[in-house]
Every structure is written in structure tokens, then in C-alpha cells.
Amino acid sequence: MNAVKESWTSRWQGPGGIREALAIGTPLMVSMGTMTLMQFTDRVFLGRHSVAEIAASVPAGLTSFMFLGFFMGVASCVSVLVAQYAGACRPERVGPALWQGVWFSLAAALILAGLAFLGGPLFAWAGHPEEVRALEADYFFILTLGGGFMILSTTLSSYFSGLERTVPVMLVNLAGAALNIPLDYALIFGKWGAPELGLRGAAMATVAGSAIICLLFVALIVLSPEARARHKIAAMPRPDAEMLLRLMRIGAPAGVQFFLDILALTGFSLLVGRLGLVALSATNIAFSINSLTYLPIIGMSIATSILVGRSQGQKRPDIAQRATGNILRLSLAWMWAVGLIFVLLPGPLLNLFETTPGVAPLPGTPAFADIKDMGVVLLRYVALYSLIDGVSIIYFGALKGAGDTRFVMLTMLAASMGVLILPTWLLVQTGTGGIHGPWLCLTAYIATLALSFSLRFRSGHWQRIKVIEETPHACP
């Protein structure tokens, strides 16, 4: 990093300073926090409706998200192109970059509709208890069938975030949450005249929320004079092979990386499910609480990508380094604070997922007290790896903003298979270590990513990567 160490006061000012990082990153943290709130509330509702439904929701949701992951990873790289073109003073290239993301999103929606039918065979293969298998298949089908809305909303939000206009992204996500959470409640419990659909209702509410977010983003873009005049959004171009190839060059490795990360967590959840319903439910609840930690930091990771992308477009890697260091410090402070809550107050957090008194549990479901006891232990693991995860997430954002997505993909492939999935499978098959064995593997996996990404960024290799074509003229 920079040879001259800065004080906290001096870090506040200038390009890549804490003030700029917060101006861009805070709305994104709120946006991701909104997504966290929707997911967390969704699982609290499900936990109060049925223990079997909370047990089914995370494996099925992760499996669906695994299929969406590749497409979301590609779509999110629209922000890298937009940021670098904006940094290079090429506004006329911003619109074509966005449109290639839109065409890609529409193709992804068709593919996902075909993949929606794979849920039944997948969960039968996983060997989960019979009482949750049908629920998993239903949840997976609805989420995957409607997954195109999530891909498209990722593309559209990338236009705004790439231009460092993160407040509209925040406002749209807040509006989406304001509509999604009550809809979720109504469809799960059958309130306000809606049918009681349980887990299927939760999936329908999620798809409806994504569709609403897409419509709001479209409205903002259509009503923007700058989008029409400077970025040439109004003209609907045909797919541009050159620009699409540029998107896929950085987006495909990012998509594979995203897919591998979700695959690793999905495989982990499926394997832990073989230890029984108590282990599966406790793990799913711990993951849900963990989202309170890492999803807001994903917002800061996106801010890192934007600032690094802009700096690369300006040919100022020194600003990219400064921004990354400042955002990392902010993120570690957040991780430390939230991790402390997990250690000191696990009981109240876990109690949120207890089935509502008077609701009869399904036959074969375990007592919540057993799930809670294991959940306390698992939240200590979450607190342990949270700081390490913060390092991994921020350096990932920096490498992505520079276009160094191929390294990230290869690292994720090696770590997911060699450090997480295969060791976890071996421990579960041999019955070694109980619940501790898989969670120690998960901690080691996150530590491997953090070390690899930080060393790669510090090596400076990313500074030599070219994402956009050479700028024919300098910025004024």
C-alpha cells in the first residue's frame, strides 16, 4: 500500500478518502442492509410458521441462488464498465455497456426458467429428511422461475452505482423492502385476505419484490435526461458483439466465482443436513443471522469496485489503493462490532426464530431448545470468522473493480473444493468432529480467500489489466 502512513484526519479528505468512501458506500450499505432485513424477516416469519420451513428455506434458497449466481456475477460487472468509461470521460460508451447487460439479463431469464425444474432431483440426491424435501423443491422452483427479475435489477442498479449515484439504488431498495415485507407476512401467514402459503408464499413475495425493484429502476432511467442525452440510453441498440465480449471477458470469471462461492456454501449446507435436522436448522439460522454482518459489507465492496474502476479509468492506481485501504478499515470496524454482539447476545437473536406458541410442529421436527443450544455455538464461529470475511470481501471488490476476475475465479475454485467441500464431506461421512468439523472447514475457507485476495492486491498485478479500450482523449 502507500509508503506514507496517513492519520485518520488526513484519510478523511481527497479522492479515495473516507468521506468519499462513505458518500458512495453508505447508500449501498443501506441497500444491502435492506436486502438483509428482507431475508432476515422472511426467515423469522418462516421460523415462527414452521421449523421444517426454516430448515428448508436456506438450502433451497442457496441452491436457487447458486444457479442465479453466475448470471448475477456477469450482470454486476456492468458497473465496472460504467465506472471505467465514466472515469475515462467516455459517457457515450456508458449506454451501450448498460444495454449489453440488459440483453444478457433477458437471455438469463429464459435459461433460469428451464432450470427451475431441477429442484426435486437435487434435494432427493441430498438425502435431506422427507419432511423438508418437498418444501425445498417448491421454494427452489418459484425462486428460480422468477430469477430473471433479480438478474435484471442487478444490471439496472449497476448503471447507477457505476456512475457513483448510489442514493437512487438505496431509495429503490428501500421502496422494494417497504412493499416486500408486508407481502411476505401476508402470504406466509394468510393475513389481510391472502391465502396462507407458508414457504411458497415467501418465495412469491421475493419474486414480486424483485419485479417491483426492476420497474422502479426502469422508471428512473427513462425519466433521466442525462441517461438519454449523454449516455444514449433511449436508442435500443442490437446486441453489440464487441461490447458484449468486453463484458463477458471480466463478467464470466466473476460469474463463475459467484457461482463457486454459492456452490461452496450450498454444498456445505447440504452436507451439514446429513447430520440431522437439529444441525441443519441451527446452521441455517446462524447463516441468517450472519447475513446481518456480511451483506452490508457487500455494499462497501461494491463501493470499492466503483472507486477502483473509476481510478483505473483515470489511470490513477494510487487513488485505488488509498480507497481500498480506507474502506477496509471502515469494514473491519463494522465486523468487529457486530461480531461482539453475536458472542454477547446470542440468545435474543436465536429466539427470533422460535415457532410461535400454539403452532403445532410438524411430526419429526426437533425441539427449538436443542436448535438454540447448537446455534449459540455456531454464532461463536460466525463471530470468529467475521473479521476475516471483511478482509476477503473488500479485497475481492478491489480486484473486481480492476478487472482481475480470472484470479478471483481460480482462487475460489481451489479453495471451495480443496478447503471447504471435500474436507467437509470427509468429516460428515466419517462422523468426525460433529458440527465443529464442518464449521472449522468453513472458517479455514474464508481465511484462505482473505489471504489470497489481499496478497494479490498488494502485488500490484491488477494495475496492468486493461478492461476498456484506450481512451483517445484525456479528461478535461
Image (spheres, helix red, strand yellow):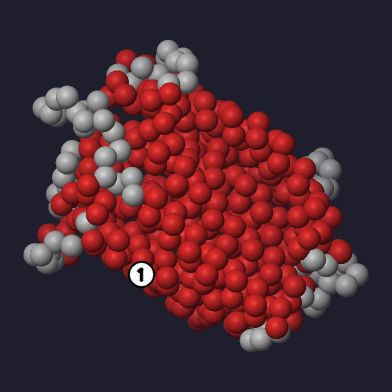
Q: Which residue is drawn at 52% across and 26% down?
A: 103
Residue occupied by mark 1: 451
- Describe residue 255's horizontal placement relative to residue 209 as left or right: left
Quadrant position of the C terminus in the picture: top left
Q: Nearer the viewer, residue 253 or 352?
A: 253
Residue type, mark 1 in image: Leu
Q: Say what secondary structure mark 1 lies in.
A: helix
Where is residue 462 drawn, in percent x and y?
Answer: 26, 51
Q: In this view, does 435 lie to the left or right of 175?
A: right
Query: How far from the left and from the top, in percent, is residue 298?
Result: 43, 54
Instruction: List x then y, in percent, for residue 387.
Output: 40, 71
Q: Quadrant of residue 347?
A: bottom right
Query: In the rendered view, would you say 419 is above or below 304?
Result: below
Residue 361 vs residue 190, the one in the foreground? 361
Vertical arrangement, residue 216 with respect to residue 308, above or below = above
Quadrant of the rendered structure where residue 394 is?
bottom left
Residue 82 position within the rendered picture, expressed as x and y whole percent measured from the top left: 34, 33
Picture quadrant where residue 250 is located: top left
Looking at the image, can residue 348 be seen? no
Whether residue 340 appears in this view of the structure is: yes
| Residue found 72% across the figure and 36% down from its top | 114
Residue at the (54%, 56%) spot, across then down: 260
Measuring 36% from the left and 69% from the top, which residue is drawn there? 451
In the displayed structure, 144 sits above or below 418; it is above
Look at the image and tell me in which quarter the N terminus lies: bottom left
- Residue situated in front as seen by the camera: 263 or 209: 263
The residue most toward the right is 363
> Within 10 angstroms of label 1, few (less than 14), some, or many (20 or more) residues?
some
Q: In this view, does 446 lie above or below 435?
A: above
